[in-house]
Amino acid sequence: MTTNLQQMPPLLEVRGLTKMFPATIALSEVDFSLRAGDVHVLVGENGAGKSTLIKLITGVHRKDGGTILLEGKEIDPRSPRHAQELGISTVYQEVNLIPTLSVAENIFLGRQPMRWGMINMRAVERQAKQLLQDFNVDIDVTRNLSSYSVAIQQIVAIVRGVSLSVKVLILDEPTSSLDHQEVEMLFSVIRSLQERGIGIILITHFLDQVYAIANRVTVLRNGKKINEHLISELPRVQLITEMLGKELTQDTHSRDDTSTSKNTNRVPFLKVNGFARKGTIEPFDLEIRQGEIVGLAGLLGSGRTEVAHLIFGIKQNDSGEAYVHGKPTTIKSPRQAIRHGFGLCPEDRKVEGIIGDLSVRENIILALQAKMGWFNYLSRQKQNELANDMIKALSIATPNAEKPVKELSGGNQQKVILARWLISNPDFLILDEPTRGIDVGAHAEIIQIIKRLADEGKAMLIISSELAEIVAYSDRVMILRDRKKVRELEGDDVNENTIMHAIAAD
Amino acid sequence: MKSRFIPLLMTFIVFAAMYLFAYSRFSSFGSMRIVGNLLRDNAYWGIAAIGMTFVIISGGIDLSVGSVIAFTGVFCALMIGRNGWDPIPTFIVMLTIGTFFGATMGMLIHYFKIPPFIATLSGLFLARGMAYVLSTESIRIDHPFYESVSKLVYIFPDKGRFTFVAGAFLLVLFIGIFVAHFTRFGRNVYAMGGNPDAALLLGVPTGRTTVMIYALSSFLATFAGIVLSLSKQSGDSTIAVGLELDVIAAVVIGGTLLTGGVGYVIGTFIAVMTLGTIQTYLTLDGSLTPWWIKIVIGVLLFGFVGLQKLLSSRQGLRLFSFGRDRKELQQSA
Ligand SMILES: Nc1ncnc2c1ncn2[C@@H]1O[C@H](COP(=O)(O)OP(=O)(O)OP(=O)(O)O)[C@@H](O)[C@H]1O
Ligand SMILES: [Mg+2]
C-alpha cells in the first residue's frame, strides 16, 4: 500500500457495521473504506452480505451497530432518499425502476426540472435523451420502460444513478445482464466518473471484471470482512481462496471425448427442421440426442432466448417441424412441451419464477408437484428430503428450508429456481443463463450437476454468455448472430477462441 | 399510438358513441342546456371520482367517499341551517376535518400496513355512523349565501345554464390534470402504483405521498359533499350510499388500471360524463327504468377490465421480445 493513498482521507468509511436478521447475522463488525476516485469491488459468495452492506449504507435497512462516516462526518441514512440527498446513489441488483413510466420519467423521477412551478416535461425528455446518448444509447425515451429489454432497463438505472450529483455511486451486480459490449460501455463511464473524483462501490461475481476495473477489493465471507487488497497485489487464486475459505477445485475441461463419441450412437431426443418465426428468428435446424449437451452462444439479443421460447412453446413457430423421439410433434404451448418431458429454467427468474413469500422448500417442489398433478401429493417428508438435498447440492445459503425465498440473497434465489427445474426431472432441460449472479464456488458446483444430468441420459440445451462455461460442458455449440443460426461447432472446435470468432463474424 | 393511450381512446370512443346515439334520438343533446345540466348534475360525484383516480393510480382504493359526502352534507346543514354558522367558515372547518380524516386513513395504510380496502372500509362505517349520529332526518338549509350561489350562473344564448357547481367541477378537473402530470407529487403517485418497492428505492417519499393521496381523496369527497349541499340546499345522512362503487366504476371505465400505475384524470371525467349521458337519456326516454344505468355500468366495467387484461398481457409478451431494442442499440453504436 502506498503511503500516498493512506494519507488521503476516506470518502466513505464504515466501522464495525452489524446487521442481524431473524436467524441470520447478515453482517458482523465489518469495516470498509472508500476513497475518492476509487473503484472498490466487493466480492464474496452468495449470501456473504454484500447487498446487506450496501443496503445499510443506503438506508434500505437500519444498522444494528457500527458507524458510517461520509467525508469524515457521521451519517445515519434513514431511507434511500435520504442517502441520495447525502450524495450516495445506488443501482440495485434487481432492476428497480417503474415499468409503467417512460424511460425519461424514470431517470428524473423525484428531481424533474421545473418551470413556473410545473414539471417541464420537454426538458425531462431532452435531458434524458442526452444522458443516454452519453452512453451511446439512442432510444425513444418517451416509451414505457417495460417495452425495453432488461439490459436497457439496467442501463437506464445506471444513467439515473450517475446523473444525480453523487459523491458515492454504488452498483450492485449491474453487469449480470449486460453483454460484453455493454459492459465495456459501462466501464468506460465508470472510468470517467472515477476521474471526476467519485467513489464507486461495485459488486460483481465476474472475476475478469474485478481485474479489469477495480483498484481495490474487499472480500466478505459469512457476513465478516476477510481482507482488503489493492488489486495489483492480489493474485486471482488468493482472491478465490479468500472468498470461499477453501481452494477451488478447478474443472474447466471439456467433456471427455468418449462421451461425445458415445453420443453419436444415441437416438436423437429432439429434432427440429427449419424452425422459424417471422421477426423473431430465422429458420434453424437443431438436433439434440439423449445424454448430450448443446450450448447456445451469441450476443445478448442474438435470439438465444427466442430459440428456447420457440422450442418450449412459449412462442409458436410459423414454419418448420419438430420431432420428439423421431415422431413428428407439434409444440404450441409450454403445457405440451412439459408433457413431452421438456423443462425450461427461464432467464428472468425474478419475473418468471420466484414466489417470494413461499418457503425455499415450497419453491423447489413447485414444478415437480405441478407435473405430478396436485392430487398426487408429495408427502411432507419427501418434500423435506428433496429440498434439503438440493440445498446441500447447490450450497444454498439458508438456515433452513422453511425460510421465505425473498429473504435469501439474490444469488441464492437463483439457485432455488434452478433447483426447482433440476428435481422436476425432465427428459430434456433448457437452461437459460443458469449461472448468472452465482458465485464462483456454486458455479463450479452447477457445472458439475449439469454434466451429471447429461451422463444420466438427459438431453440439454444451455444458453450462456460465459464462453468458458459453455466450453466446459457442451458437446456441441450452436452459434447465433442477429437472430440467425450461423454455425454449429463440434469436437475440437468447441473452444473459446472458435466460438468467439463465430459470434463476432467469420 | 402508444399502447398506454388505448384505454383512454376506448373511453372516448364509448362516450362519443353514447352521446351521438342520444343526440340521434333527442336533438336536445345538441344544446348547451343538456351540456350545462350534465356538468351540474354529475359535478359532485365527478369531483369525488377525480380524487379516486389518484388513489387507484397509486394502487389503492378508497371506499369511504360516499359516507364522507353524506357526513359533509349533514354537518353543513346542521351548522348552517340549525346553528346559524356562516357558510364559508363552515366549509373551511369541514374541509379541514375531511382532509384530516383522509390523512388518518393514509397513515393507517402506510405506517400500520393496513390494506387500503380495510382502512377505508372502517372509514366508510365511521363517517356514515357520524352522519347518522348528527342527524337522522333531512335538514334544509335556508341561507342567503346558498341563494346567491344558485343565482351565480352564466346563461348561454340557447338558455343553457352554466352553474357555479359546474364551474367548480371543471376547475377541479383542470387542477387534477395539472397535479397528475405536472407536479412531482403526481408523478410519485404513478410511480408508487407502477412498482411500490422500486418507488421507495428511487427516493419517492412513499409515506408522505400515501398520506397525501388519501387526504386528497377525502378532501375532494368533502368538497363534493359541499357541492351537493349547494345544489340540494339540504343535508341528509342517507344519501350517497354505495356511491363509492359508482365512483370506482367511473375511474375504471375512464381507463385507469386497477393494478395501479396507469390512468388519466381526463379519462375519469369522460367516463363520468358518459354515465351521466346515459342517465339523462334514460330519463328522457322514459320507456326504460333508470335502473338500466346499473346494467350499462356493469357491461362497460366488464368490457374495460377485459381490455386491460388484454393490454397488460400484450405488454407482458413484449418483455420477451428484445429484438427491436437491440436493433435500436446497434444502430446507435
Ligand atoms: N430481508 C431479509 N430477511 C432475512 N434475512 C435476510 C434478508 N435479507 C438478506 N438476508 C440474509 O442475509 C444474508 C446476506 O444476504 P445478502 O443479500 O447481503 O448477500 P449477498 O452477498 O448480496 O449475496 P448475492 O451474491 O447472492 O447477492 C443472507 O444469508 C440472506 O439470507
Ligand atoms: Mg446481493
Image (cartoon, coloured by chain):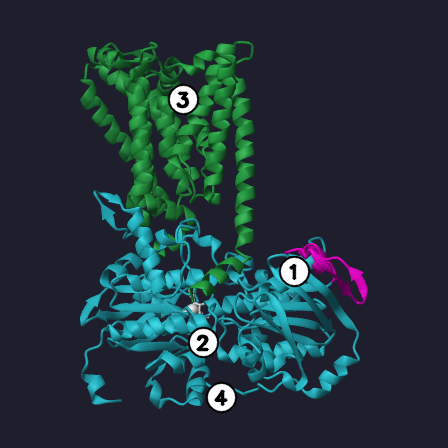
The magenta span reads A315-340
Q: Mark 4 Cα within 10 Å, few/some/many (few <14, many 20+)?
A: some
CB at mark 2 closer than 8 A to ligand 1?
A: yes
Residue A254 among those drawn in magenta: no
- Residue B116 location, x and y as percent? 41, 40
Which chain wears green? B
Judged from the image, the secondary structure of the residue bearing numbered disc 3 is loop
Looking at the rendered structure, which numbered label has been put on residue B3? none
CB at mark 4 closer than 8 A to ligand 1?
A: no
Residue that carries the numbered disc 3 in the rendered image: B240
Q: Mark 2 Cα within 10 Å, few/some/many (few <14, many 20+)?
A: many
Residue type pointed to by label 4: Glu
Question: Could you give the CA–CA distance between mark 3 and mark 2, rounded to whole angstroms?
Answer: 60 Å
- Residue A206 location, x and y as percent? 45, 77
| Quarter residue B64 falls in | top left
Residue type pointed to by label 3: Ala
Judged from the image, the secondary structure of the residue bearing numbered disc 2 is loop
Contact flag, marks 3 and 1 (Cβ < 8 Å): no
Residue that carries the numbered disc 2 in the rendered image: A205
Judged from the image, the secondary structure of the residue bearing numbered disc 1 is helix
Residue that carries the numbered disc 1 in the rendered image: A310
Q: Nearer the viewer, mark 3 or mark 2?
A: 2
Residue drawn where x is 47% and y is 26% of the image: B15
Q: Nearer the viewer, mark 3 or mark 1?
A: 1
Residue drawn where x is 33% and y is 85% of the image: A229
Question: Are discs 2 and 1 both within one chain?
Answer: yes
Residue that carries the numbered disc 4 in the rendered image: A247
Q: Residue furthest right?
A: A327
- Residue A17 location, x and y as percent? 30, 72
Residue A322 among those drawn in magenta: yes
Q: Mark 1 Cα within 10 Å, few/some/many (few <14, many 20+)?
A: many
